[in-house]
Image (cartoon, coloured by chain):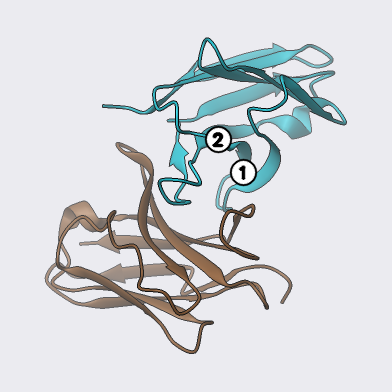
Chain colours: A cyan, B brown
Amino acid sequence: QQQVKQSPQSLIVQKGGISIINCAYENTAFDYFPWYQQFPGKGPALLIAIRPDVSEKKEGRFTISFNKSAKQFSLHIMDSQPGDSATYFCAASSDQAGTALIFGKGTTLSVSS
Amino acid sequence: GAGVSQSPSNKVTEKGKDVELRCDPISGHTALYWYRQSLGQGLEFLIYFQGNSAPDKSGLPSDRFSAERTGGSVSTLTIQRTQQEDSAVYLCASSLQEYQPQHFGDGTRLSIL
């Protein structure tokens, strides 16, 4: 059973547009939700993270929206740039069940210029 | 260096051989994680070390996999009698303490012939 479901698998956005990636989780014990960005040949880099006590967190052009009742969270990239072209992973973990991250399958974002 | 360092960056070996992968975490980070990234399975947790506590080995796929962490710093992941399905990128991450953001190295790309 996939505990974190991520969609879409791939996404093409025009430069300046908004990129939206969605994730849904099963385990209500999850209490930490990070997003990672990965470029080819590199390891995942932490982009932004949220805990369930807030519904939104913004850092620059990146925003996480969190809906606890729906068990969903999403990443919005405003004013998308070609340099944002990468694979994005959502993840979740529970302080109660150990700190290992459970990852979504990833979304490959391509921003066209 | 400032980040998580992994070596070798690439490893090609024959089926049945043993391999050792090394991870040097960020200085001062007490928690260390190993993950595996493959096309079919995405990013999967393997094992977690925190200080002097017994490691969480719940993600190791078989008894051919083992890991140790010496002196609370460098970690080695060993795969014995490698199989073709072990081909993947092996990623190491560290965090300042338990329940803190995880920072990844660039991984070791393992290819089993």
Instruction: Report whether B36 appears left or right of A17.
Output: left
Of badges 2 and 1, nearer the viewer stands 2
Q: Position of residue B3 (x, y in %)?
A: 68, 68
Outermost residue to the right = A60
Q: Residue at x 66, y 45 (%)?
A: A46
User: Amino acid type of disc 1?
Assistant: Phe
The image quadrant of residue B61 is: bottom left
Q: Chain of mark 2?
A: A
Classify A111 as above or below B57: above
Q: How far apart are the two marked residues, 2 and 1, measured between alpha carbons?
A: 27 Å
Q: Position of residue B34 (x, y in %)?
A: 42, 61
Q: Using the image, tell me which numbered label, if any, was put on residue A90.
A: none
Classify B81 as above or below B106: below
Instruction: Report whether A59 appears left or right of A107.
Output: right
Residue tagged by mark 2? A31
Give whichever of discs 2 and 1 has the lower sequence position: 2
Instruction: Report whether B67 appears left or right of B70.
Output: left
Classify B112 as above or below A31: below
